[in-house]
Amino acid sequence: MYRVIRFVGIIICRILFRFEIKGKENLKQDTNFIVAGNHRSNWDPIFVAMNLGTNVAFFAKKELYENPFTRFILNKSNAIKVDREKADIKAIKDVMRTLKNGNNLIFFPEGTRNVDGTAKAKDGIHLIANRTGTNIVPCNIESSYKIFSKVKMTFGEIIDVDEFEKLEGDFSENLMDRIASL
């Protein structure tokens, strides 16, 4: 069912937006990875997923499951339900299991949409990448998100989580700086 949903999403996105995608070659890895991007719109997970294969999971806030249609789509789309109001250990374990099973993960380090770009990244990405040893592909999405507007997506070079760990400063802030520089 995920393939059908992804296919429909790609068609809708290609009709409604114009895409300029750079660095797509960075998504061709021998092992699974986490795509970490900035998050300004509800379109972002769809934009990223349309560039990845079918072995992709992502977090979805629990509030999205209140609508029956959205719940159906999320349940069929490898979404991992997360309660952002608490430390959701079940969601963290689910995503770690997903990564250990060889799936890729779409992750937005800010934890929520960040329209003006001022929110700080949370530490979840550090915990997940470090505990699973999964490398990260940074992704920057630029768009006005208006119908028929251009969406510029840049996928950066893969970040070796062990090497990135050695950098001075906060892991999540360093990652957001890398995303912003794309």
Image (cartoon, rainbow, N blue to C red):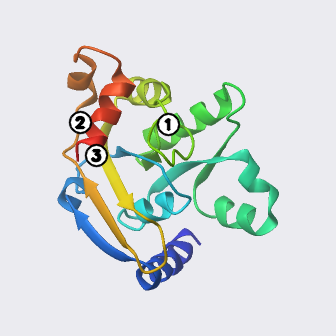
**Residue 22 placed where, x, y %?**
21, 62
Marks 3 and 1, Cα distance to the nearest angstrom?
25 Å
- Name the residue tied to disc 3: 31
- Is residue 129 something one can see in this rendering? yes
State whether residue 47 is above or below residue 98.
below
At horizontal 67% and vertical 32% (from top left) the residue drawn is: 90
**Residue 26 placed where, x, y %?**
20, 53
- Name the residue tied to disc 2: 159
Marks 3 and 2, Cα distance to the nearest angstrom?
13 Å
At horizontal 44% and vertical 38% (from top left) the residue drawn is: 100
State whether residue 143 is above or below residue 120.
below
Say which of marks 1 and 2 sits in front.
1
Marks 1 and 2, Cα distance to the nearest angstrom?
18 Å
Q: Considering depth in this image, is 175 or 149 the residue closer to the camera?
A: 149
* Mark found first going from the N terminus, 1 or 2: 1
Mark 3 is on which residue type?
Thr
In screen coordinates, is 105 left or right of 150?
right
Q: Considering depth in this image, is 157 or 130 the residue closer to the camera?
A: 157
Q: What secondary structure is marked by label 2?
A: loop
- Is residue 54 something one can see in this rendering? no
Image quadrant assignment for residue 64: bottom right
* Mark found first going from the N terminus, 3 or 1: 3
Q: Considering depth in this image, is 87 or 147 the residue closer to the camera?
A: 147
- Name the residue tied to disc 1: 110
At horizontal 23% and vertical 36% (from top left) the residue drawn is: 159
Residue 17, disc: none
